[in-house]
Every structure is written in C-alpha cells, then in structure tokens.
Amino acid sequence: MANEGLKELYIDELKDLYNAENQLLKALPKIAKAASSEELRQGFNEHLEADPRTCRTPRAHLQVLGYQSQGEECMGMVGLVKEGSDVMGEDFDHAVMDASLIGAAQRVEHYEIAAYGTVSEFAKILGKAQHVSLLQETLEEEKETDEKLTDLAKEINSQANEGTEQEGSRPNGNRRTKRTARN
C-alpha cells in the first residue's frame, strides 16, 4: 500500500505549482512590456500564450485525484515575481535591462524545472503513469524555454557589455548601467 504521506505531498506540490503558474500568468505581460528587444518581448509573449496550457496540467491532475486546485500561495513564486518587479523598476539601459529580465526569467524557469521534476518523480512512485507523461512534457517545455533564454542572453549580454542600444528608449531617459544596492 502506498504511503499516504507522499500522496498528500504530491497533491500539495501540484497545488503549489498551479498557484505558481497563475502568478506567472499575471506577471508575464508586465515583463514583456519592459523588454526592449523585440525577440525577447516576443519570447515572453509566446510563453504567456503557452502558460495557460501549462497551468491546466497541475489543475487537471488535481481534478482527476478529486481535489480542488485551491491551495496556499506559492511563496517561492511570490519572491521570484517580486524580484522581477524590482528589476523592472530599475533604470537600466535597454540591453542591460533585457539582460536583467532574462536573469529573472531564468530563475523562474529553474524554479519550475525543479518543481515539475519533483512532482513527476512523485507521480512515478505513486503509479500515476498518465500524470507522469504530462508532467514530463511540461518539464521539457520549461527546459526548452530556459535554453531559448540562454541563447538570447548570449547576444543581449554582449550588447549590454558593449553598451549597444536596443530600439526604443527608456521612458525617463536615464542611461545607468549599474544596479544600485537595495535595502
């Protein structure tokens, strides 16, 4: 007989993932708007279009198991979204801002990769074969997104280092390229 504790943990992790995905859905439009690179903005918007499908994965598993998708707020994602919001409040040059946004986005992706990898392994042990395939598919999508961000970062980080300007301008006209210390 399976350990009920692991099943409860699996359910809690799915609820956490569902909440995390919903938080990200709300934050992505602001992040996309802050990007000056058209390619980066497009990438964020594509992820936004894909995320409603991703968000349904944990919810669907919970419904099959007979649980509601409501749970406590995912504090990990709260922190990551706040960090991203703080980044957008800086007055970095265009490429430096984009490099900073990529860093924030990759932290989110790494969090999601860890979370989907964890629940996928729980599903395997609990004998939830249908769940495993969907969770693995979502895990691969998160890894692909991280790889795309890494590829974008190579060009954007070089531009940031060289001081190369992207199209458009920062609304306040500031051209600071170094982050201030936060309290």
Image: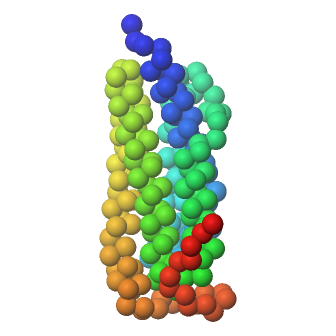
Q: Can you say which quadrant of the picture contains the N terminus?
A: top left
Where on the picture, by quarter, is residue 114? top left
In this picture, residue 1 sits left or right of residue 41? left
Q: Can you say which quadrant of the picture contains the C terminus?
A: bottom right
Residue 149 vs residue 56, the one in the foreground: 149
- The answer to whether any part of residue 82 appears in the image is yes
In this picture, residue 167 sits left or right of residue 151? right
Q: Residue at point 60% right, 69% down?
A: 182
Depicted 110 relative to depicted 154: above or below:
above
In this picture, residue 125 sits left or right of residue 37? left
- The answer to whether any part of residue 56 appears in the image is no
Q: Which percent across, then down, holds residue 50?
A: 49, 55
Residue 175 vs residue 171, the one in the foreground: 175
Q: Residue at point 47% right, 27% down?
A: 10
Toward the top, the furthest residue is 1
Residue 89 vs residue 64, the one in the foreground: 89
Q: Residue at point 42% right, 13% down?
A: 3
Q: Which percent across, then down, holds residue 54?
A: 49, 46
Colour scheme of the picture: rainbow
Q: Residue at point 37% right, 73% down?
A: 153
Depicted 182 relative to depicted 140: above or below:
below
Q: Which percent across, then down, holds residue 111?
A: 45, 49
In this picture, residue 105 sits left or right of residue 90? left
Where on the picture, by quarter, is residue 119? top left
- Give the mark count: 0
